[in-house]
């Protein structure tokens, strides 16, 4: 880092959406600053990648006083963009001028909150937009409907995460274990199986389980009631739901279905306006660190 020509190192978690997303954000924000930046994926720090290696590297740089560093007259800085996940809910967030968290569960939520779903879906499937209009409609309403459809699944996953219960219910999954197919309502039998699985792994009394499970459900209900489902609903789950909607709309008809999930993500990225006010909370720490590195005039 010290011998590189790069002044600002921007560390990101994922390999799929993060590099392009944050590169676009940095390019938009730093265009006139003359600060040279580089996006560094977490798998450059540790093979498995992810959040924890980045936090560990942040702690190392903080310990050696190198988050902002000067070496032979050259100043370098580091900024870490992390997915919020459930860190705010579980009081795990690291507060630092050199760390910025996503507003929503993770970066993919932005694709569905700020992207043009109709345009992205049509482009990904190589379709005209007309057959998709009835199934997608207004983007905000579509997200609310889909998040509501999987609300029971969110309750199960949030409980498992909160009490560290090993089960089939977890946020790492790309689909719901109780909504099969994805557009179907909760299957009561599958829901009962999952809840019993959580009960078995919980390890306390039936009364305590009922109390804590009810608390988690009330938490989810509160987030949904406030329209804040994207804070606890994994953005990549929308991808599976949108894929299901496209397939249903085009049932029996030919369309470009090969690699559809990746195509949807790629298409949605290009529909986002990275100069929009939605990105202000991500731009602010970037501007702050860059201001300390900008060449003196």
Image (cartoon, rainbow, N blue to C red):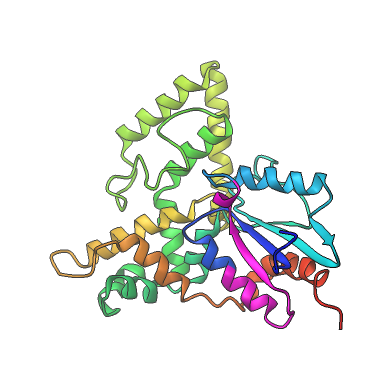
Where residue 35 sits: x, y (%)? 73, 75
Q: Quadrant of residue 27?
A: bottom right
In the image, residue 104 lies in the stretch drawn in magenta: no
Percent from the top left, x then y, of residue 257?
24, 64
Q: Which residues are magenta?
A: 23-45
62 and 51: which is toward the camera: 62
- For this view, does 269 lie left or right of residue 66? left
Q: Nearer the viewer, residue 268 or 44?
A: 44
Look at the image and tell me in which quarter the C terminus lies.
bottom right
- The residue sitting at 78% across, 53% down in the picture is 96
The residue lying at 69 percent from left, 73 percent from top is: 36
Comparing 140 with 160, the one in front is 160
What x and y, as percent, mark residue 71?
A: 83, 61
Q: Is residue 168 left or right of residue 243?
A: right
Q: Which part of the image, by quadrant, shows the N terminus?
A: bottom right
Residue at 46% across, 75% down = 270
Q: Which residue is at a point 86% across and 67% down the rendered structure image?
A: 73
Residue 251 x %, y %: 17, 64
How many labels sit on residues?
Answer: 0
Q: In the figure, is residue 14 to the left or right of 128?
A: right
């Amino acid at each position: 880092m010290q011998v590189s020509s790069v002044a600002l190192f921007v560390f990101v978690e994922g390999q799929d959406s993060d590099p392009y997303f944050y590169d676009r954000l940095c390019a938009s924000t730093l265009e006139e600053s003359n600060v040279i930046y580089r996006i560094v994926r977490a798998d450059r720090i540790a093979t498995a990648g992810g959040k924890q290696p980045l936090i560990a590297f942040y702690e190392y740089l903080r310990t050696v006083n190198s988050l902002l560093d000067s070496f032979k007259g050259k100043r370098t800085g580091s900024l870490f963009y992390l997915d919020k996940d459930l860190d705010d809910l579980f009081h795990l967030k690291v507060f630092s001028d050199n760390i910025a968290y996503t507003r929503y569960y993770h970066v993919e939520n932005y694709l569905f909150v700020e992207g043009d779903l109709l345009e992205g879906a049509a482009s990904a499937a190589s379709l005209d937009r007309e057959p998709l209009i009835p199934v997608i409609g207004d983007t905000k309403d579509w997200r609310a409907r889909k998040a509501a459809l999987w609300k029971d699944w969110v309750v199960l996953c949030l409980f498992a995460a909160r009490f560290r219960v090993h089960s089939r219910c977890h946020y790492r999954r790309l689909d719901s274990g109780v909504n099969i197919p994805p557009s179907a309502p909760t299957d009561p039998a599958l829901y009962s199986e999952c809840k019993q699985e959580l009960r078995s792994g919980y390890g306390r009394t039936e009364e305590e389980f009922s109390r804590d499970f009810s608390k988690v459900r009330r938490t989810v209900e509160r987030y949904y009631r406030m329209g804040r489902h994207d804070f606890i609903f994994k953005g990549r789950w929308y991808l599976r739901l949108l894929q299901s909607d496209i397939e249903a709309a085009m049932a029996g008809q030919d369309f470009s279905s090969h690699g559809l999930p990746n195509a949807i993500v790629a298409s949605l990225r290009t529909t986002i306006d990275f100069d929009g006010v939605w990105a202000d909370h991500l731009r602010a720490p970037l501007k702050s660190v860059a201001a300390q590195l900008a060449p003196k005039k």
